[in-house]
Image: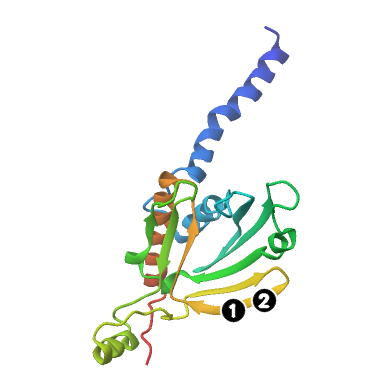
Amino acid sequence: MTKLFRLLLVATCFPMVLCPPAFAQKSGPPDPNASLQEILDWLKANIPYSYVQPQNRERTALRREAISHVRAKGCRLNYEITSDSFPTGPPGSTDYEDVRQSAERQQWAVDLAGLNPSLIKFETSKQEDRPPRIRFSSFDPNDPNVTSQLKKDGVTVFVNYSNKAIWHSDRMGDHAVREEFVGASTFAVKDEVKGRKIVSALIHAAELCRQAKPVKPNP
């Protein structure tokens, strides 16, 4: 074996020994003792996901959804969810204009310090052709506004509850649909294994952010 060949062999094999741990650090579960920045970096690498599902029972159109452009700064997590449809049936079986107009773009901004860690959960799919999802909420039973409503109404369903921790804007086709704060939201994940890792990372990030920036109750 020539000296040059030995050098090429070492140069080729050496990275193969070092690279798997670095890759595992991104795709494997985040370290329980990781810093906030490390957790956010892990979330940015693991939240993006896209999938395709039938848009109607006849399956004359498919809908493609993707979560992307995940960004994080401090305790603020931003991402986009885009979805669009495309026909699968023969010409005339689907209204192409309706399909085009159904393209949707959502922009989300989440203040991790405002989330309730106990309400960040993995949800299995109840439909075979739908992916599982992660649900998170800012609902806080200790919020004075919540307490006052409970005293007034006894049992209250907080459909529009929000402590301004979860914001989103929604566009359908060329038209702006809404821009508002909401009390809860979801996004799709590939499978249960990946989903539960993301849940653990989100809970850890929310807890670290709440420690760094305690949520102040509304006056």
Q: Does residue 212 sit above or below 124 in this rendering?
A: below
Q: Residue 211: percent from the left, percent from the top?
A: 37, 71
The quadrant of the picture occupied by the C terminus is bottom left
Classed neighbour count for the residue bearing mark 2: other residues with Cα under 10 Å, few (<14), some (14–19), many (≥20):
few
Q: Residue 118: percent from the left, percent from the top?
A: 32, 65
Mark number displayed over residue 152: none
Q: CA distance from mark 1 to mark 2?
A: 8 Å
Q: Is residue 167 left or right of residue 86?
A: left
Q: Residue 115: percent from the left, percent from the top?
A: 40, 71
Which is more toward the observer, 171 or 56? 56
Q: Is residue 59 left or right of residue 218?
A: right
Report the amino acid beneath label 2.
Answer: Ala
Instruction: Give SS at disc 2.
Output: strand
**Residue placed farthest to the front in the image?**
92
Q: Which residue is mark 1?
A: 179
Question: CB atoms at circles 1 and 2 under 8 Å apart?
Answer: yes
Report the amino acid beneath label 1.
Answer: Glu
Is residue 14 visible in this depiction of the protein? Answer: yes
Q: Which residue is mark 2?
A: 176
Q: Nearer the viewer, mark 1 or mark 2?
A: 2
Which is more toward the observer, 189 or 64? 64
